[in-house]
Each structure stands twice: as structure tokens, then as C-alpha cells.
Amino acid sequence: MNSPDTILAPKRITAKNMTEKEFFYGHKACAGCGGSVAVRLALKVTGERTLAAFPAGCMAAVGFIYPQMAFQNNAIITTFPGVASMASGISVGAKALGLKDYKTVAFAGDGGTADIGLQALSGMIDRGDDLMYICYDNEAYMNTGIQKSGLTPYGTQTTTTPAGKNLPGTKTHKKNLFEIIAAHDIAYAATASIGYPQDYINKVNKAKQIKGPSFIHVYASCPTGWGTPTNTTIEIAKEVVDTGLFFLAEYENGEFKLNKNPKEFKSIKNHLSKQGRFKHLTDNDYDIITKQRDMKWERMRKFWTLP
Amino acid sequence: MNRPVKQEYNRPTHIKDFPVGPQFDAGHLADENAGWRTFKPVVDAEKCINCLICYLVCPDGTIIKGENHVSVAYDYCKGCGVCANECPKDAISMVKEER
Ligand SMILES: Cc1ncc(C[n+]2csc(CCOP(=O)(O)OP(=O)(O)O)c2C)c(N)n1
Ligand code: SF4
């Protein structure tokens, strides 16, 4: 494993200088799927010699529809809880075979990461296995029809947390996944959003240089599960950062660093009311969401390095 | 080649026609996605400044880089409209498909 201070500052990746090859092409994700933006961009950074693993979830379901194989690189489906362990095995196996110039990447949804796959992920980081783990967070179990996960935010209507007279939809707040991962003292962890693609691809590029485990939590909208128009996928993922409901940060050298510290937040109500899953929210719900956001930012601004 | 292309798919008739694993080789495309579309993105070459924002954010990788402006790989574009929505110059418009 590298000691954290040996992480090289790699050359900045842009749309202009990135490879023109597509590695996730012809897949059957819904039109406007944010998860597929996250996977496509990451693969364009990690390149042809990526050994990718996907647990059960949308990206596995849409990428491997026999006889269609949408991945241009090496890719495999794993058990739902086991993507981190299978990817660890792939990484160790590639080393044993003496392969050179490859990167192992595990991609999983929020359910596959923050709930059922958390134990395997923790073990992967603990062992110091050499691979990158990317969690594309669409804030529910989408592939099985929108069930609440540990990363579903307060007030979200899902099929297991319906909104009505007695319930505001989801009653719990998002798990602090990024901090949970950082608590393992991992060499590199980051949060990102497909709404800030430039920031995201450069975080992937940074994680690619790490010899050892690295982790990226990327916010990825889902028009089907969120009740949003297919063309607003990127707009919503940008806005969520601007409202402070999601944040861009890195954990490196044992330190938390905020990458973006908005002077003023955009309106939460304006942002959430555009999404079908939040249509039912009351003013009281907005107060709860705003309070939770402000508490989180107070803590981050107090203890984390600011940009 | 930057993108895989659709190949003729023949139903296996013998055990040797099946792939060794549960999948065909990387990039084996047997089907297009164009049929999903009701609107298609049309690029105005005059307005496009080649900033490549649409190229970055296309969920399907169907924006093709060009010398002076982008173009669209229509076989696999699903017509989501993300490119048109993100274009800072309004150089992409969504036009109803006539079929
Ligand atoms: C052990 C096990 N339990 C349940 C399932 C059914 N299942 C398949 S995909 C999925 C949801 C995946 O949700 P998430 O990880 O959030 O990814 P997304 O579908 O949102 O991309 C579930 C519950 C399974 N395949 N294996
Ligand atoms: S349900 Fe959501 S995450 Fe799954 S393929 Fe459709 S848009 Fe993507």
C-alpha cells in the first residue's frame, strides 16, 4: 500500500484528452440513467485494461443482457453482497498471474454498498487489497423496483416507505457512508456527483494511482426511480450539491477536505419539489431536511479542511 | 474502433456456438437501442463550440467528437435529451422522430 503522501498528482483529465473509446456501450439502462454516466466515465478513465465487477443491481442488469455484452473491457457479475470480496479475488488473481497495467474496479449501487455489501467492503479495505470501489448512489434499490436503502434520504417516497397521512416517506436520514469508509483509514476516499463530471473523473484518476484500496461515492440520479424527466439527470445531480444536500469531499493523509463550500445554498424546496419522489413533502418535512443539512455542514465546516 | 458495432446474431445450433462463460465476448452487440427514442437530438453545427460537455454527460456514449462540432451515434442514442439540456449554447435540439 502506498503511504498516503506518495499519491502522485496525476495530469488533469478532461473531455478533450480522455480516450475516445467507449467501454460501456449499447447497454439497456433507462434513457437518462445517471448510474450509467458514472460507470461509463469511470471506465473511460481506468481504460481498456480494467477488470470490473458488478453485483446484482441495475448496472449488472443492463450491461449483460445475453447475448448483448455492453462492456468492452473485462467485466463480471457477482453476488449481491459480495462484489468487494470477488473484486479482491480478481485483483489478487491478476497479481498472481503476473498481469501488468491493469486496474480492478468494483461498481455497486447504494444498496449493494451501504447495506448488504458493507461487510465485504470493510474487509476489502482492511486487507489493503489493490482495487478501486465506486458506489453509484441512486438512493434506493432501483433494480428491484425502488426500495429504501441506507442511503435513501429523509422524506423519499419508495415502495417500502410509502408517503401518506402517517408517514413522510422515508423516516431516516442518509448514512454517513463516506465517513464510515474513511474511518477505516483508507488511503483515498472521495465523494463526487455526475453533476460535476470534471471533478468526478479526476477523482477516479487519482484513485487509479493508489496501490491499495480506494473508494468513491458518486451521486447518480435515476429518472425512473425519482420521477424526474430523463433530460434533467445531470441538472439534478449538480443542484443537489448546490443545495448542500450532497457534498464534494476527499479523505487523504488522514484528513477530511471539502472541495466545495457554497457561500449560499440553493433552495431545497425548489430542488426537491421537481422530483416525483418528494412531491408529498410538507413544510415540516422541509424544516427537518434543512435542519439536518445545516447540522451536517456545521460539523464539516468546523472539523474539515475547507477549499 | 472507438465503439463496438452491431453484429449479426445467429441463434446457436450446436454446443460449440455458445460462449464459454455466461456471456459473449466484450463488446458483442446483437441489438440496437434506437427504437427507444421518440425525440432525437439534432446538432446545429454552426452553434456548437465543441466544448464537449454533452460528450461527457451522455449516459450512452453516443456523442461523437469531431473536428469542429460533435455529432450523434443514432443507433444507440435513446433520446433522453441530457445533451440538449446541458448544452450551454443551445446547439442541440430534440426533434420528434418520424417513423
Ligand atoms: C442476496 C440477494 N438478495 C436480493 C437480491 C435481489 N436484488 C437484485 S438487485 C437488487 C437491488 C440493487 O440495488 P442497489 O444495490 O441500490 O443498486 P441499483 O439497482 O440501485 O443500481 C436486489 C435487492 C439478490 N440478487 N441477491
Ligand atoms: S432504474 Fe434508475 S438506475 Fe436503474 S437503469 Fe433505470 S435509470 Fe438507471
Image: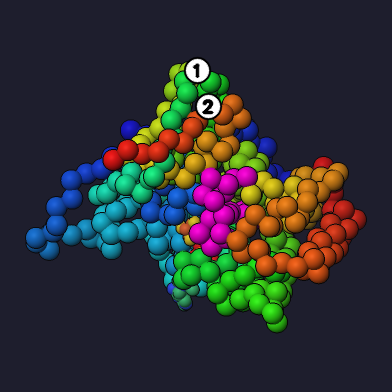
Q: Nearer the viewer, residue B43 or A125?
A: B43
Q: Residues within 10 Å of mark 1 (few under 14, many from 20)?
A: few
Which residue is at 61% across, 76% downward?
A162
Which residue is at 27% across, 49% downward?
B31
Q: Amino acid at mark 1?
A: Glu
* Quadrant holding the C terminus of chain A: top right
x and y percentages locating residue A83 in the rendered image: 49, 66
Q: Amino acid at mark 2?
A: Ala
Which residue is at 51% across, 49% downward?
A230
Q: Is residue A117 magenta?
A: no
Residue B46: mark: 1
x and y percentages locating residue B40 in the rendered image: 41, 38
Q: CA distance from mark 1 to mark 2?
A: 8 Å
Which residue is at 58% across, 71% downward?
A158
Locate residue A60 relative to residue A152 in the image: left or right.
left
Q: Is residue A221 magenta?
A: yes
- Judging by the rendered image, the residue that carries numbered circle 2 is B91
Chain of residue at mark 2: B
Q: Residues within 10 Å of mark 2 (few under 14, many from 20)?
A: many
Is label 1 in contact with label 2 (beta carbons under 8 Å)? Answer: yes
In the image, is residue A302 above or below residue A160? above
Locate residue A218 relative to residue A41 in the image: left or right.
right
Q: If you read the primary sequence from the N terminus, does the residue marked by circle 1 or circle 2 appear first?
A: 1
Chain of residue at mark 1: B
Q: Is residue B62 visible?
A: yes
Farthest residue in the right direction?
A302
Q: Is residue A26 visible?
A: no
Same chain for labels 1 and 2? Say yes or no: yes
Residue B83: mark: none
Q: Secondary structure at mark 1?
A: loop
The stretch of residues the image draws in magenta is A214-235
